[in-house]
Amino acid sequence: MSQCALCLEERMLVESHLIPEYLFRPLYDSKHQFERLTANPNFDHSMNKGIRYPLLCAKCDGGINTAYEQPFLKFWMEGQALNRTLCNQAIKDLDYAKFKLFHLSILWRFAACDKRYADHFDLGQHEEPLRLMVKNGDAGAFNSYPMFPQMLLKQDGSIAYDQICIPTRNFNGRYLGARMVYAGCQWSFIISPNVVLEDKDAVVSAAWPHPFGQILVTSIPLEECRAHCDLEQVRKRFLS
Ligand SMILES: [Zn+2]
């Protein structure tokens, strides 16, 4: 028995996926096994079970799956949301709370897992508010912990669904941020419960999930993706 990171009850913990396993399927489908975590050709470890960690009790693990992961699977992946839109156009009809909390739940899971490592992905004071948002299904206001996607395009014009990158922190001068790569996009998070908008931010904020159910997607070439991670650390931490 250990403490579940989400409900804080003493329970048997399950090997939770930190990133839903279905987001790894494009890699299996094309190569029958997960051959690489990013474009790094030196990463040779098979990861065909995805990234897992004993973090949650079965009830919380199942709850996240039902509340956030399955809706995202249907809407974004099976619904081919990126293919249905032209670049720089809005994707509509998304469920604001489920969509936003899907992304925040992944970010939170990385912060909540093993803290023995000095370089573990740390959300500091923001971890607890994010735990409560995920637990309570509260996506907060438009400017609370927003994120925006940039579709990653390969040279042949296809969407880079086969790229996965765990979170890395950054700082934009005003706010702590984080970047991850999955589901065909680089996702940039702003780690603040109340992002103050200035006039020049209007374009950026248009790309955040909006409570009326849309998000703007821009695109960048895969080569310009700035997310990166220490692959050796990932291997040691999650695969040993
Ligand atoms: Zn729990």
Image (cartoon, rainbow, N blue to C red):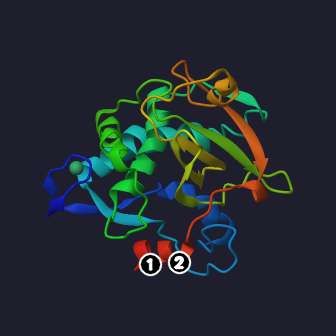
Q: Is mark 2 within 8 Å of ligand 1?
A: no
Quadrant housing the N terminus: bottom left
Residue 52, how many percent across, how many down?
40, 65
Near-viewer residue (88 or 27): 88
Q: x, y percentage for residue 133?
A: 34, 35
3D distance between C-alphas at marks 2 and 1: 6 Å
Instruction: Tell me which residue sits at (79%, 33%) in the image.
Output: 86
Label number found at residue 232: 2
In the rendered view, would you say 184 is above or below 14? above
Residue at 31% across, 51% down: 61
- Up-down: is 207 above or below 181? above
- SS category of the residue bearing label 2: helix
Q: Residue at x 70, y 27 (%)?
A: 203
Which quadrant is the C terminus positioned in? Answer: bottom left
Kindly identify the residue that appears in the image at 45 percent across and 33 percent down: 98
Q: Tell me: residue 160, above or below residue 71.
A: below
Most foreground residue, 44 or 167: 167
- Badge 1 residue CB within 8 Å of ligand 1: no
Tag 2: amino acid: Glu
Residue found at the far front of this picture? 173
Left/right of residue 179 with respect to residue 235 in the rendered view: right
Q: Quick one: SS at disc 1?
A: helix
Q: Badge 1 is on which residue?
A: 236
Tag 2–tag 1 contact (CB < 8 Å): yes
Q: Position of residue 9 (x, y in %)?
A: 15, 51
Q: For mark 2, does the 10 Å Cα neighbourhood hold few (<14), some (14 to 19), or many (20 or more) residues?
A: few
